[in-house]
């Protein structure tokens, strides 16, 4: 029997018990507003254990939730809500973009189609002047996305972002517990000779610099603020791996393609017959803030993006199940990171 491409199915585990059906689906179906989700529930397009759902139904362990998306669901709701447009003028847009469902997969064409869906509602120039898939800050996570309206503004915008005093801040959840509070990573990066999708440390490659600072600690994990001072492909991912703090989810440079609650919660018991859903199944990178001089007016511009919901959910789980280790007096973190790749 062929699969229904419009069917979305979810199994409820212990993390989700007690959530309201409409809130749960709004979180899982990120591109659709809650009012639209409620309308679909009222139309009988959402079923819980085979029965029509109710918006305020409290989810129970083992519930199966099925959503039959309308054929025109994408036309009913754009990928971005009006409040996701953080800055708009005649030169460019700054958007709070959702995480790409293919971030980190390196599948050819996937980034272009995802960004095309995000940018399609806006009045941007037609190809080839439409923002490219590799547009800053890139597809490798969630948060701020800067989209020039025309090709003419692109060189000035790129120069403004690289000018002295300009800054972009990424938040990154990494695996490991650094003995230092911050530092600078200076490791040149070049293409991998055998894998077109990977980069590697290369002394003859492109110079790359990333400054970092610990934001929050957990047992086995850490939240870092990263400030790239150059723009090399995969720079943040490669640099984090280079100081032995790979991203908590990174199939290329880390140890896993998804993070599960069973890896975080001690004594987690899997439920028979219920497949565990990942806490996070994309790169834990979030473009949090940017500050630079406007390329045409010279006026200072600073924009921040709120933390993505899925990453916020992971941090809450870590605070609950992986609080930081107690340190003895006099053993506070310090020092500098290793200068050579792992």
Image (cartoon, rainbow, N blue to C red):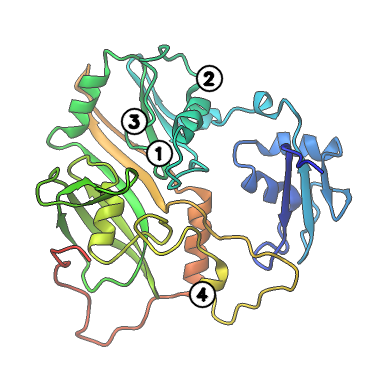
- Assign the C terminus to one quadrant of the image: bottom left
Q: Secondary structure at mark 4?
A: helix
Q: Residue furthest left?
A: 204
Q: CA distance from mark 4 to mark 1?
A: 30 Å
Secondary structure beneath label 1: loop
How far apart marks 3 and 4 lie (CA) works out to 37 Å
Measure how far apart labels 1 and 3 are at the Cα level.
8 Å
Residue drawn at (28%, 60%) of the image:
241
Observer-nearest of 243 and 299: 243
Tell me the residue that label 4 is attached to: 321
Alpha carbon distance from label 1 to label 2: 18 Å
Which residue carries the number 3 mark? 135
**Residue occupying the point 56% across, 72% down:** 262
Circles 1 and 2: CB atoms closer than 8 Å: no
- The disc, 1 or 2, on the residue closer to the chain's N-terminal end is 2
Query: Eyeballing the image, is 13 above or below 107?
Result: below
Q: Earlier in the sequence, mark 2 or mark 3?
A: 2
Front tag of 2 and 3? 3
Q: Residues within 10 Å of mark 2 (few under 14, many from 20)?
A: few
Mark number displayed over residue 139: 1
């Amino acid at each position: 029997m062929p699969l229904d491409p419009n069917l979305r199915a979810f199994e409820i585990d212990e993390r989700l018990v007690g959530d309201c059906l409409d809130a749960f689906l709004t979180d899982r179906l990120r591109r659709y507003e809650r009012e639209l989700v409620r309308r679909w529930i009222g139309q009988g397009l959402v079923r819980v254990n085979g029965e029509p759902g109710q918006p305020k139904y409290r989810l129970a362990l083992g519930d199966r939730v099925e959503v039959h998306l309308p054929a025109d669901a994408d036309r009913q709701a754009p990928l971005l809500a009006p409040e996701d447009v953080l800055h708009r003028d005649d030169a460019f847009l700054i958007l709070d973009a959702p995480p790409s469902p293919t971030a980190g997969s390196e599948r050819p064409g996937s980034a272009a189609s995802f960004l095309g869906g995000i940018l399609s509602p806006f009045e941007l120039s037609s190809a080839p002047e439409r923002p490219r898939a590799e547009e800053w800050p890139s597809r490798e996570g969630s948060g701020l996305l800067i989209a020039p309206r025309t090709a003419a503004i692109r060189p000035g915008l790129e120069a403004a972002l690289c000018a002295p005093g300009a800054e972009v801040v990424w938040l990154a959840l990494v695996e490991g517990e650094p003995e230092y509070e911050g530092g600078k990573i200076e490791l040149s990066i070049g293409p991998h000779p055998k894998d077109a999708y990977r980069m590697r440390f290369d002394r003859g490659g492109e110079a790359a610099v990333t400054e970092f600072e610990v934001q929050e600690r957990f047992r086995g994990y850490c939240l870092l603020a990263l400030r790239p001072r150059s723009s090399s492909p995969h720079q943040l991912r490669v640099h984090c791996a280079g100081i032995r703090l790979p991203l908590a989810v990174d199939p290329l440079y880390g140890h896993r393609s998804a993070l599960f609650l069973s890896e975080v919660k001690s004594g987690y018991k899997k439920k028979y017959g219920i497949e565990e859903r990942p806490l996070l199944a994309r790169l834990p990178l979030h473009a949090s803030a940017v500050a630079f001089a406007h390329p045409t007016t010279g006026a200072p511009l600073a924009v921040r993006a709120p933390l993505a919901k899925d990453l916020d959910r992971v941090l809450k789980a870590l605070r609950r199940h992986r609080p930081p280790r107690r340190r003895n007096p006099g053993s506070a973190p310090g020092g500098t990171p290793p200068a050579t790749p792992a």
